[in-house]
Image (cartoon, helix red, strand yellow):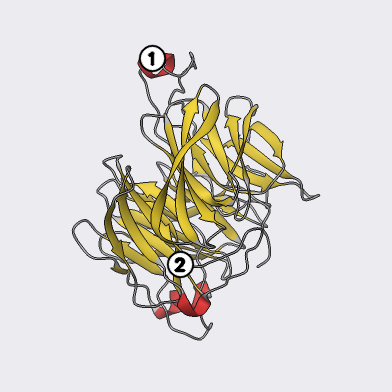
Amino acid sequence: MNRRTFLGLGAAALATTAIAASAFGGWTLMHNGAQPLLLSARNDSTGKHFAVGYRLDGSQVFATQVSERCHDVVPHPFLPMALFVGRRPSTQSYLIDTRDGRLLQALNSPAQRHFYGHAVFHKDGEWLYATENDTSDPGRGVLGVYRLQGEQLQRSSELSTHGLGPHQLLWLPDGETLVVANGGIRTEADSRVEMNLNTMEPSLVLMRRDGSLISKEQLPEQMNSVRHMAVASDGTIVTGQQYMGELSDKVPLLAIKRPGQPFQHFPVADAQRQLMQQYTASVAINSEQRLLALTAPRGNRVFIWDLDSTELRLDAPLADCAGVGAVSEGFVVSSGVGRCRLYDCRNNKIASSPLQLPAGLWDNHLRLA
């Protein structure tokens, strides 16, 4: 891999009532402006780590130096703050004021736990759930449950993810059901070395907020690690996989679970599958346009499909492409070595144009708030 020194971003809902603000110490609520705020983690040329926020016109809102490299970013549903989640096996994440970049909290994982790079706020804004590794039983997946009190997250409890090596988690549209991508891989503390490639157990789990299991499904290939996801407004779930077997194995790396249907492969032509080189990075869905986007940094490709017909709409080169997020025009994609780009999908022919953002040094994910 050639990169990757950081940035992550995605989409967050914005609230408009003042009632919620009073419950959180008088914060001024965010408002839906003309330009979304792109949130991500990023390095500078010397390798220092930053949590950053940019408008899409290239104007910098903040760049806050942090101690450890981050992965995904979790905007609060209505307060001007976001958690920049530590990249596996980090033991620290960073709660940032998105108005000015003020570091509100360096959140430390408890003993025998480390972060897996992803988390979600509940829609009420009070609770946060983070995927974590139980290093006393390496790979046993847990969700750390944290309560927001003022400007601090306090650990309250933890839940099982009903699987090994959890990575991304998201909400279904009801805002109460969690979907968890269990990568199926055991790793020890302070290590990214895989311990169980011959006995991997990747799965897609639906669970309630109280931790009870709704469903657990697996793909046919035992070494096809379920890692990143996107959820459409109708509840359709799409996952991107990272295959841990041989490069020559013909394994689909995109999967889908439509409402009421089983978890199964999303049809991808062999030409595109080969370009992915057994690795996908980020997934995004534009629910308004019913489009699905995927980045494959090993193959330096961006793909866009019609979510319903499964027709391929775009197969385009982008060096070390990383994060992807939906915007009104289509998708924004970041790059580890080049310019971030906007893919305008409003016409039959998708148009690509560079954004006036700093080039390169972006990580796997980006969030739009």
Task: Please identify the residue farthest to the right as the structure is shown.
Answer: 46
Disc 2 to disc 1, how far (Cα)? 42 Å
Q: Which of the numbered marks, if any, corresponds to residue 184?
A: 2
Q: Position of residue 54 (x, y in %)?
A: 60, 36
For the point 58% across and 67% down, which residue is it?
Answer: 300
Q: Is residue 281 above or below residue 43?
A: below
For the point 52% across and 74% down, which residue is it?
Answer: 196
Q: Which of the numbered marks, if any, corresponds to residue 254?
A: none
What secondary structure is found at the residue carrying circle 2? loop
Looking at the figure, which quarter contains the N terminus? bottom right
Of residue 52 and residue 125, the one placed in the foreground of this image is 125
Examine the image and state in which quarter residue 182 appears. bottom left
Q: Amino acid at mark 1?
A: Ala
Q: Position of residue 273 (x, y in %)?
A: 45, 75
Q: Position of residue 284 (x, y in %)?
A: 42, 53
Q: Amino acid at mark 2?
A: Gly
What secondary structure is found at the residue carrying circle 1? loop
Q: Is residue 338 above or below residue 177?
A: below
Q: Earlier in the sequence, mark 2 or mark 1?
A: 1
Q: Are marks 2 and 1 in contact (CB under 8 Å)?
A: no
Residue 216 horizontal side relative to residue 43, left or right:
left
For the point 35% across and 66% down, which residue is it?
Answer: 255
For the point 20% across and 63% down, which residue is it?
Answer: 261
Pointer 2 local density, CA inside 10 Å: few below 14, some 14–19, many at least 20:
many
Q: Position of residue 169 (x, y in %)?
A: 42, 50
